[in-house]
Amino acid sequence: MNKSYESDIRVEGDTVVKTYRPVYFKMNEDFDRHGEQYWYSRLRSDFFLAPLQIEENFIVLPRCKRSLGTPYYPKFSMGAKKDTVSWLKSLYEELKILGVCHHDIHPANIMLTKNGIKLIDLSWMTHNTEKKKLEPLMNLGYSTNDRRALAKIQRQVFYGKNKF
Ligand SMILES: Nc1ncnc2c1ncn2[C@@H]1O[C@H](COP(=O)(O)OP(=O)(O)OP(=O)(O)O)[C@@H](O)[C@H]1O
Ligand SMILES: [Mg+2]
């Protein structure tokens, strides 16, 4: 389904299985990352897509129909634009309340589901007190700073930039 460096994403019926490659565990060590399972098993928030199963080398997520940016932003009505921008603003507040930084916010990591908008991909998440090197992170042109990445996405959703 998806070519990725650190993991293998496989659709199984209504679920998506994300299996971590050895490089994921190596990056956790090299960059002193907690890893995605750590966060998914600790955080309880409506803003994140909740896994159905969390294991040492894979997680199972409910399958979402699409993300905010694969390959184009959906054509939003004015109402949907306002709802999406308001969700993006609330997400920033939620991250502050939870005391975390995501560091990899971009449209392909934001899923549109029947239960609302959900953030995925917690590989680079940190406590907001942690100072981390995030060198290998490319982020598809979005900042590793959550506030800046969210501001860019808000502008793109609102002003209708199609390609991200
Ligand atoms: N539950 C899901 N339903 C549908 N598509 C998904 C789901 N989870 C992931 N995807 C798709 O697969 C892509 C990659 O998943 P994800 O962001 O978790 O891994 P990644 O970017 O490869 O992360 P990493 O950098 O940790 O390897 C997402 O951008 C999304 O398009
Ligand atoms: Mg991703």
Image: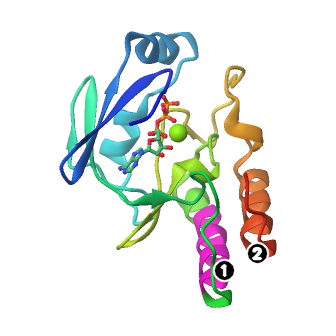
Residue at (72, 21) in percent of width and height: 135
Distance of label 1 from label 2 (alpha carbons): 6 Å
Dot 1, crowdedness within 10 Å: few (<14), some or many (≥20)?
some
Where are the magenta residues, as a range? Answer: 80-93
Numbered tag placed on residue 81 in the rendering: 1
Residue at (38, 60) in percent of width and height: 65
Residue at (54, 48) in percent of width and height: 109
| Mark 1 CB near ligand 1 (8 Å cut) | no
Numbered tag placed on residue 158 in the rendering: 2
Residue 43 position, x and y percent, is: 38, 51
> Considering the numbered disc 2 on the image, is that residue within a helix, a strand or a loop?
helix
> Considering the numbered disc 1 on the image, is that residue within a helix, a strand or a loop?
helix
In which quadrant of the rendered image does the N terminus lie?
top left
Dot 2, crowdedness within 10 Å: few (<14), some or many (≥20)?
some
Nearer to me, 163 or 129 = 163
Task: Name above or below for residue 161 compared with residue 82.
Answer: above
Q: Is residue 107 left or right of residue 10?
A: right
> Tags 1 and 2 in contact by the CB under 8 Å rule?
yes
Nearer to me, 41 or 76 = 76
Amino acid type, mark 1 = Lys
Ligand 1's image quarter is top left
Residue 51 position, x and y percent, is: 28, 48
Q: Is residue 159 left or right of residue 137?
A: right
- Mainly helix, strand or loop, the magenta region? helix
